[in-house]
Image: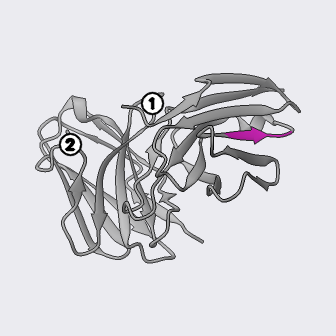
Amino acid sequence: GAVVSQHPSRVICKSGTSVKIECRSLDFQATTMFWYRQFPKQSLMLMATSNEGSKATYEQGVEKDKFLINHASLTLSTLTVTSAHPEDSSFYICSATLDTDTQYFGPGTRLTVL
Amino acid sequence: QQQVKQSPQSLIVQKGGISIINCAYENTAFDYFPWYQQFPGKGPALLIAIRPDVSEKKEGRFTISFNKSAKQFSLHIMDSQPGDSATYFCAASIEGSNYKLTFGKGTLLTVNP
């Protein structure tokens, strides 16, 4: 149980385009989902916390207009990177939790912006 | 301010040996301490977790030791295997904080055959 999926696993896009990443909890309803960014050989950096049906809470320094997060249902959250630039290239990982401390992570999405 | 300090940054162990990774925290409000294992190109997977009311928790070859007074906790991997080679992250969270995790910087473990 407690499986979280992400789609796509890899995406390459041109600079200036927008990219949407989906995060789904497959076998449980996630009241809270998190989005992280991870650079090579570094730790996970929390970008935002999203609760179903409400606006996401962004961490300090994360541009909410650039990284749009929608948590429309208890099993789906999306992260849209708007007007992507090469510096947005990174590994994006989501996690989900059901009113507990335990976070279950997705497999990650590798974004490359050319 | 780094609230969870993890060491060492990298660790090389021979097959069958014991791998030990340490973490120290500053915020005494932390009350949940998980360890995650991450393979290259994959998301982190929960290994084992502990709360402050116990000093040790064991699951198979993995053991967490917790020292509340010293504000430290460690992961011990017994009989380390090449398949254990991965990056390990400790983390901490506060109940009621919307379950936000504060991660350590990670330890790259290499187990030589």
How far apart are the alpha carbons under marks 2 and 1?
17 Å
Residue behind mark 1: A42
Q: Which residues are magenta?
A: B74-78
SS assignment at label 2: loop
Instruction: Provide the major secondary structure of the magenta segment.
Output: strand
Which chain letter matches label 2?
Answer: A
- Tag 2: residue type? Val
Dot 2: within a 10 Å radius of its alpha carbon, few (fewer than 14), some, or many (20 or more) residues?
A: few
Nearer-the-camera pick, A5 or B53: B53
* Place of residue B84 in the rendered image (x, y in percent of width and height, measured from the top left): 73, 39
Whether the magenta-drawn stretch holds residue A101 is answered as: no
For residue B43, say whether it is visible.
no
Residue B8, labelled with which disc?
Answer: none
SS assignment at label 1: loop
- Tag 1: residue type? Gln
Is tag 2's residue or tag 1's residue first in the polypeptide sequence? 1
